[in-house]
Amino acid sequence: MPDTGFFGHPKGLAVLFFTEAWERFSYYGMRAILLYYMYERVADGGLGIPRATASSLIAVYGAAVYLAAIAGGWMSDRLLGPWRGTLYGGVLIMCGHLCLAVPAGAPALYASMVCIVAGTGLLKPNVSTSVGNLYGPDDSRRDAGFSLYYMGISVGAVLAPLVVGTLGQRYDYHLGFGVAAVGMAVGLLVYVRGRRHLGVADLRPANPLRRADLRRGPVVGAAAALVALTAAIAVLTARDLLTPDLIVDLISVLAVALPVVLFTHMLRSPRTTARERAGVRAYLPLFVAAVFFWLIQEQGASVLAQYADQSTDLDALGFRIPSSWFQSTGSFVLICLTPFAAALWMRLGPRQPGAPTKFGLGLVLAGLSYALLIHPALQSGPSNPLWLFASFTVVTVGEILLSPIGLSVTTSLAPAAFGGRTMGLWLASNAAAQGISAQLVRLYDRQHAAQYFAAIGGVSAALGLLLLATSPALTRRVSATRGPA
């Protein structure tokens, strides 16, 4: 008899729901104030980094966080298993927030980035893989379960800017970062106490690394690449050549290149069956669509954060709105609408639209969210905050259609030997998007905001319409490769 202890879903979903809620509270709380902390004057408690550089660093920081998910997925598959990967990742994230809580300037910022990048790279693919392990391949509750899990992300993300943002902007940035660390600690406590409700598959790696594997090309090549990268960083640092702009450019290139490498490896691996290989090919257009969606959605922490701070009338509603509060809008919309989406998918069952259709609609809505800002950006003077709230709302409706469905289709199309790495690949779609965004945000300024929104929004909407036009054929390909061989 199936486990239905959490709103018709396995009890383990509740554990992962609240673990992710607290982890996202810590991450989105930190992210809500990080840009402002970076470019605020030193005299006002910030670091005094130029705005354009700070925006690019925010984007590549996000890219590195999700790029690290590829390595985290590999460590889960070959060494740790999902349980330990999630646990160790959470500990590293907490340490990263504690670094920011200390008023130690730029060194503490860079140390926190290293910890949070490594920790999120371990946690994100593994906790999502654990959700997939709660369901059988033909369980019709899968998409609805991921939608509920995604609402857990939203619960933490909606509270974070309101709590951490208010403390950081109105009192002290380091106090806000300290509260983010406490949030991650609570998430770890929930996860450890709920271990018995998770699947047995979470306790061991899906494809354990054997002694003979250490002599094979991919492992040797990865080790050599890591050594070469470490040596290059050491040389550049010693010669004072490792500038923020160079870091941005290097991570942008890696963010786009590594997903290509991973796709190629999975398609060529003898561990991938013919049916799984067809599934990976069917997954590729969805991955590209996700990249363009996240390109817009993730600019909420860079471009739209600047727009909120510089171009929005923060006193229009009768009180001073902290600019970080706008980043709660999307999460609030997710909490309100996700249960309806989950109920709709369960009610429709096999009659629901396929993943390509949902992706296409989500991408069109992302484009429209930027189109909404063209008119206020053309006006002289600060714009009404309702325009920005509306933009965040529209892109979030698109996120409901795309992101939880992307998690679901990724776990169902993942080759058996690449479960964690395929989830890392899904998260790397976000990394690729932010790697590209790190270059694009340099083009944004207050004077040309309307042109910026029109260009990026128009391209995204056009690609969404193209995906909708081809969705019947692509849906047939996805359906043919899902489920057991």
Image (tube, helix red, strand yellow):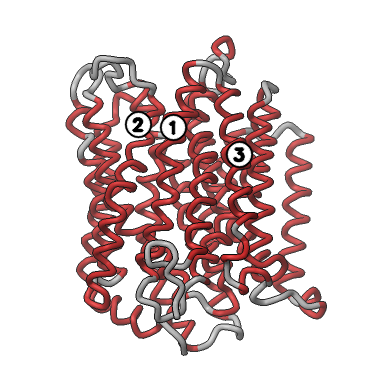
Circle nearer the viewer, 3 or 2: 2
- List the residue tagged with mark 1: 161
Q: Which residue is drawn at 22% across and 29% down?
A: 386
Circle nearer the viewer, 2 or 1: 1
Q: Residue at x 60, y 81 (%)?
A: 269
Please tell me whether residue 88 is drawn above or below residue 245 in the rendered image.
Answer: below
Sequence-wise, the earlier of marks 2 and 1 is 1
Q: Which of 77 and 182 is in front in this view?
A: 182
Sequence-wise, the earlier of marks 3 and 2 is 3
Quarter-of-image position of residue 222: bottom right
**Dot 2 crowding, Cα within 10 Å, few <14, some 14–19, many 20+:** many
Locate residue 230 relative to residue 432 in the image: left or right. right
Sequence-wise, the earlier of marks 3 and 1 is 1
Label at residue 326: 2
- Furthest residue to the top? 43
Please tell me whether residue 257 is drawn above or below residue 96 in the rendered image.
Answer: below
Determine whether label 3 and label 2 are within 8 Å by CB: no
Quarter-of-image position of residue 149: bottom left
Determine whether label 2 and label 1 are within 8 Å by CB: yes
The residues bearing labels 3 and 2 have C-alpha atoms spaced at a distance of 31 Å
